[in-house]
Image (cartoon, grey):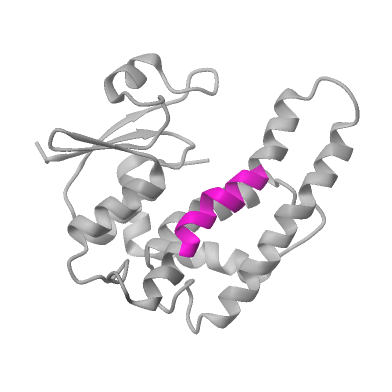
């Protein structure tokens, strides 16, 4: 059995960890589950522990939680050439980490506000709520398009994927696929970025191994 187990919930951030493991060429086992009433099965939550959110990585006897934390952990331990995350002190490291953190603290934060309004708002004008919340999402995507234009390559920090892309791909795909704040607007550079991520051999291997879909 591989020393690494990836607890993988469908339609979740779990694809981030699978893509990174494929990029690192680290052997791993997938324990995948479908959602039940939009939630992870209780048996999977019990086995993986933590808050019951996924992905969860088990490396030997150590459990690692939160996709951004998993990303940094795997890069620190297995990216010995610092291909995906530059070493401490290198200015490019902090350029990459900006996106590792923005993927959740900005992009997912803003788009999930819209999704939760769709799911949970019981009164008032849901469309008006969504329109107000969409402002942040659209500013985020405008900024992303601008920064991609500066990168000098297909990806956020050049012409090869880094930890920045591992984290941001899911955020972008989730926003665009679910149309969270994007109605009536298009970002061709961001759409191309999503396509370029999905064309990588490592992302395709991760998708095939896990069955990932949104």
Q: Which residues are magenta?
A: 98-111
**Location of residue 147 in the rendering, given as x and y in whole percent from the top left corner:** 59, 74
Residue sitting at 64 percent across and 75 percent down?
146
- Please tell me which residue lies in front, 96 or 88: 88
Q: Magenta-highlighted stretch: main secondary structure?
A: helix
For the view shown, which residue lies furthest in the left direction?
1
On whether residue 161 falls in the magenta region, the answer is no
Q: Is residue 33 left or right of residue 13?
A: left
Vertically, is 119 above or below 89?
Answer: above
Position of 202 relative to 152 (above/below): above
- Name the residue: 35% across, 26% down: 50
Q: Is residue 169 among what the camera can see?
A: no
Regarding residue 107, the answer to whether it shows in the image is: yes
Whether residue 104 appears in magenta in the rendering, the answer is: yes
Identify the residue at horizontal 54%, vertical 18% (top origin).
37
Report which quarter residue 145 is drawn in: bottom right
**Residue 210 sits in quarter:** top left
> Which residue is located at x 78 percent, y 45 percent?
133
Camera-nearest residue between 21 and 208: 21
Name the residue nearer the viewer: 126 or 136: 136
Quadrant location of the N terminus? top left
């Amino acid at each position: 059995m591989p020393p690494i187990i990836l607890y993988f919930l469908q339609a979740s951030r779990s694809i981030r960890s699978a893509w990174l493991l494929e990029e690192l060429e680290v052997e791993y086992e997938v324990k995948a589950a479908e959602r039940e009433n939009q939630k992870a099965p209780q048996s999977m939550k019990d086995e993986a522990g933590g808050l019951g959110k996924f992905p969860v990585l088990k490396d030997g006897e150590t459990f690692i939680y939160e996709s951004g934390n998993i990303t940094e952990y795997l890069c620190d331990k297995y990216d010995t050439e610092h291909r995906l995350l530059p070493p401490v002190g290198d200015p490019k490291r902090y350029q990459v980490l900006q996106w590792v953190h923005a993927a959740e603290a900005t992009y997912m934060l803003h788009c999930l506000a819209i999704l939760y309004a769709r799911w949970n708002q019981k009164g008032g004008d849901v469309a008006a709520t969504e329109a107000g919340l969409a402002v942040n999402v659209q500013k985020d995507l405008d900024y992303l398009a601008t920064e991609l234009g500066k990168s000098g390559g297909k990806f956020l920090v050049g012409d090869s994927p880094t930890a920045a892309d591992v984290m941001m791909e899911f955020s972008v795909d989730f926003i665009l696929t679910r149309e969270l704040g994007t109605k009536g607007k298009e970002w061709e550079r961001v759409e191309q970025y999503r396509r370029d991520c999905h064309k990588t051999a490592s992302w395709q291997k991760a998708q095939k191994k896990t069955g990932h879909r949104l």
